[in-house]
Image (cartoon, helix red, strand yellow):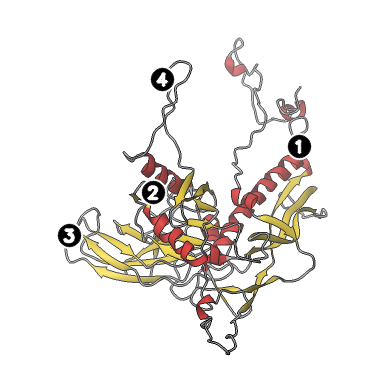
Amino acid sequence: MNTMQGVTEETLAGLEAIQKAQTTGILTGTGIYSYDLSGLVSLIPVVTPFRDIVSRRQSPDGNPYAVWRAIMNVTSSQPDPAMGFDYAANETVFAEQDFQARYKPTGYAGLVTQDAYDLAKGYGDPYAISTFQVLNQVLIGDDRKLLGGQSFALARPAAPTLTQVASGGTIGAVQVYVGVAARTGSGYYYGSGNSRGNSATTTFGSGSANKVTATVPSVRGAVAYDWFYSANGSTWYYYSTTTTNTVSITATISSNNAVPAGTALPDISTVVPTFNAAADNGSGNANDYDGFLASLAGDYNGTGQWVQPGSGTANPSINNSLDGAALTLAGGNISEIQDKLFLPLWQQIKASPTALMMNAVQAQEIANLILGSTSATTFLNTDSQGRINVTAGGRVGEVVNAPAGGVTVPIEVHVSLPPGTIVARTDRVPFPQANIDSVLEYRALRDTAQFDYGISRVANTSGGGPRKEFEIRSVGAFLNRAPVAMATLQNVA
């Protein structure tokens, strides 16, 4: 019997719960039939493009922080180079800044009991299966944390602006309170919490089909916003989550809604968010290292650690928001990418980014805009049967960077970047003597390794008997040596 196609005789013989009734003749209920068991399948997609991009390097020594130094751009502060005859030139101004990235452990654990191993004999190896599946989740977790991990708290959103609409909803003549809190990339996928919340209220004087449109200024570093409803301003119920800084409240609720699913919020955690107006509600995770988005959002303090935006030296990366507006087409190109990513980056670093990172939602929107235009060029390639077999559809793989003189920038789809956020990433910084061999790096104190635990006895507990327990984990820090060469566009509808 094939190892992965069959099941053991011991297992089948042990199915004592299957009771056979006495039958007159042999019927289907008599039970004389085989078990058609195929091999164990795994239905977990493992797509980790950002982890594959970021270089992984071993730290040469032990330290709580990875530390590097940078000569900052102070060109705008330089004195006039003209000095006149017989005068000495003015001294060049230099600014050196130390940066620190905290090392943090990440990983997952697995457990297989000896009894489970024995019962699977002849069918599969639970130890191998468990190890492989745990490793898959480690890779997925790495991709998400490298992008969205954040140790510092997001800034508190401003009080939302509420606009009454007399149609499109089921709200009557009542007072409505709307609360909002922001999430990081890690919070989006793991439901670990949101920022300190803020709220506003409005009262409808009449009607029964009212709704409320709520908007809030963009929170730098937020990839999603949790929205809440209250009838009295003290008891809050979760209403919905959006990847833009706006929402429509169409009904009053008396209990938490479920977290929405589907293409608008792919892979979002199903943990129902809560509202806290008094303090940060878990948007900053002290167990996280600061990932790529955090390195583009946070200010840095005197020791070069990333801190909440507005509380330190301003982050030099470009950050813009569409505030819930959609991408638009002009001149055969995407206006917002040209105006809010390419142009400010060119003005800041006089170079073009390496790639545009986005979710599949935005990649599809760009393809629809470009290929749906009457000005889009279509090439019809004939085959051996003439023009009978035509391939439908297409994709936009690159965008022309007009401000940089027509350089093309590839589009990359990243599954760990939620919809609504587009990042222009620069992998090579073309500055003289930049001395940067890798702009983005995972610096490992210990890279991915498996650790087996000793067996202990836990009486009267399922899983407490003979077993194998293990962890696959890393200890490292994420380094972004040139945030100045990156740009982010938030709240894209």
Q: Nearer the viewer, mark 4 or mark 1?
A: 4
Q: Would you place residue 305 above or below residue 89 in this image?
A: above
Q: Which callout, 3 or 1, points at the residue further toward the start of the chain? A: 1
Q: Which callout, 4 or 3, points at the residue further toward the start of the chain? A: 3
Determine contact: label 1, label 2, CB under 8 Å: no
Q: Is 97 positioned to the left or the right of 246 in the image?
A: right
Q: Nearer the viewer, mark 3 or mark 2?
A: 2
Disc 1 residue crowd, few under 14, some 14–19, many 20+, Cα 10 Å: some
Residue 62: x and y in percent read 78, 69
For mark 3, give the secondary structure. loop
Q: Nearer the viewer, residue 285 or 28?
A: 285
- The Cα–Cα distance between marks 4 and 1, rounded to whole angstroms, is 52 Å
Residue receiving disc 3 = 207
Q: Is 228 positioned to the left or the right of 479 in the image?
A: left
Residue receiving disc 4 = 387
Q: Which callout, 1 or 2, points at the residue further toward the start of the chain? A: 1
Q: Is 66 positioned to the left or the right of 255 in the image?
A: right
- The Cα–Cα distance between marks 1 and 2, rounded to whole angstroms, is 53 Å
Residue receiving disc 1 = 125
For mark 2, give the secondary structure. strand
